[in-house]
Image: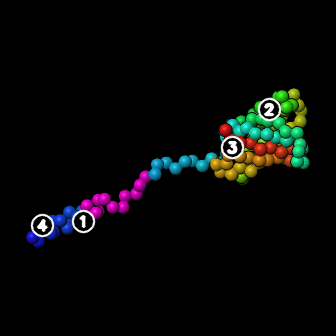
Amino acid sequence: MKKIFFGLLTFLVVSIVFTSCGKDDPGDAPTPVTKPDGVWTGTGQYGTAPGGTQYAFTMTFKSDGTLTIVGDNSTGIDNAAGTWVMVNDTMQATFKYNGSSAIYMAAAKFATNATTMSGTIGLQPAVSGVGLFTVNKQ
């Protein structure tokens, strides 16, 4: 009887050791998005006071630091090209509309994994004073 009891006890201990405390592998955690790379669509507003004329556009932030802006030409905005950088948690862009000599700048806070950015537009060297914009990640 003692042999059976010790045999069962040994089997139980071995079973517990091999089946306990295994760490589950949740898979690879998603990489946090810390830059606005990709396509964003939204609206801009001429002027900084409420009720300014609005226009629609698409901004494409490329990983090489270049930026393209394609506007809804039916509302008067042209297409633009430029560059962008991250300064701490703020996206800063410098761009020029086709056919214009004015150089514009824009700035918006960008939180990790953000899907919306709202910011300001200004004439170089200012990043504000000309307009406002809000874009959503596509």
Image quarter (top left, top right, bottom left or bottom right) of the C terminus: top right
Among the two numbered marks 1 and 2 on one chain, the one whose residue lies closer to the N terminus: 1
Disc 4 from disc 1: Cα separation: 14 Å
Check disc 1 and report the residue beneath it: 13
Q: In the visual, does 85 lie left or right of 99?
A: left
Quarter residue 72 falls in: top right
- Tell me residue 107's x, y (percent): 79, 47
Residue flagged by tag 3: what amino acid is it? Pro
CB atoms at circles 4 and 2 under 8 Å apart? no
- Who comes first in sequence, dot 3 or dot 4? 4
Residue wearing tag 3: 36
Q: Are marks 3 and 1 in contact (CB under 8 Å)?
A: no
Q: Position of residue 135 (x, y in %)?
A: 74, 42
Q: Which quadrant: the N terminus? A: bottom left
Residue under label 2: 71
Q: Secondary structure at mark 2?
A: strand
Q: Are marks 4 and 1 in contact (CB under 8 Å)?
A: no
